[in-house]
């Protein structure tokens, strides 16, 4: 059965919905983790905390990921690498599968 834009298959809808919703899910998981870690920072000035808070909230997927990987000291390094690296890997995989499903 041939799949095209006029007649998409179930696979196209399935992977396409993951590709659409996964960035929202990652933001809903990473942003609270990042904001909680930011609230526990004792050695950071209030201005830096406000700037990081805005960056985490305004730049959806990239902001929390960068904060967790580069700045956060609340969580263990391995946990942060698995959470951010695993989520990013799944997101890239789903995007690639979404592109393939349109071929």
Image: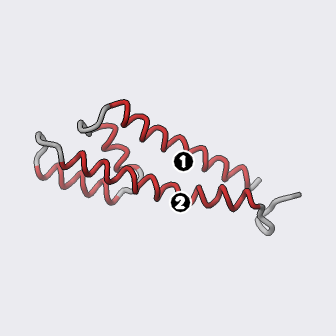
Answer left or right for 82 relative to 20: left
Mark 1 residue element: helix
Badge number at residue 26:
none
Q: Is residue 82 above or below residue 9?
A: above
Circles 2 and 1, Cβ within 8 Å, touching? The answer is no
Looking at the picture, tell me which residue is in the foreground, 39 or 71: 39
Return the x and y of residue 9 as percentages of the image width and height: 78, 61
How busy is the neighbourhood of tag 1: few (under 14 within 10 Å), some, or many (20 plus)?
Answer: some
Residue most extreme to the right: 1
Label 2: few (<14), some (14–19) or many (≥20) C-alpha neighbours in 10 Å: few
Secondary structure under tag 2 reads helix
If you read the primary sequence from the N terminus, does the residue marked by circle 2 or circle 1 appear first? Answer: 2
CA gap between label 2 and label 1 equals 10 Å
Q: Residue furthest top?
A: 78
Q: Which residue matches tag 2?
A: 21
Would you identify the image quadrant in which residue 53 lies? Answer: bottom left
Q: How many marks?
A: 2
Quadrant in the picture for residue 2 = bottom right
Report the residue at 30% width, 48% height from top. Answer: 34
Q: Quadrant of residue 68?
A: top left
Image quadrant occupied by the N terminus: bottom right
Residue 20 drawn at (x, y percent): 56, 60
- Residue beneath the point at 44% across and 52% down: 26
Q: Which residue, given by chain and number where applicable, does mark 1 sit on?
A: 91
Q: Is residue 77 left or right of residue 98?
A: left
Give the residue displayed 17% in from the left and 45% down from the top: 40
């Amino acid at each position: 059965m041939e799949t095209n834009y006029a007649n998409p298959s179930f696979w196209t809808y399935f992977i396409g919905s993951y590709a659409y919703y996964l960035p929202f899910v990652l933001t809903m998981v990473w942003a609270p983790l990042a904001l909680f870690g930011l609230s526990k920072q004792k050695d950071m000035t209030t201005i830096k905390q406000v700037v990081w808070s805005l960056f985490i909230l305004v730049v959806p997927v990239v902001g929390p990921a960068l904060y967790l990987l580069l700045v956060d000291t609340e969580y263990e390094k391995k946990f942060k690498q698995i959470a951010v690296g695993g989520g990013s890997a799944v997101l890239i995989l789903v995007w690639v599968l979404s592109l393939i499903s349109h071929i």
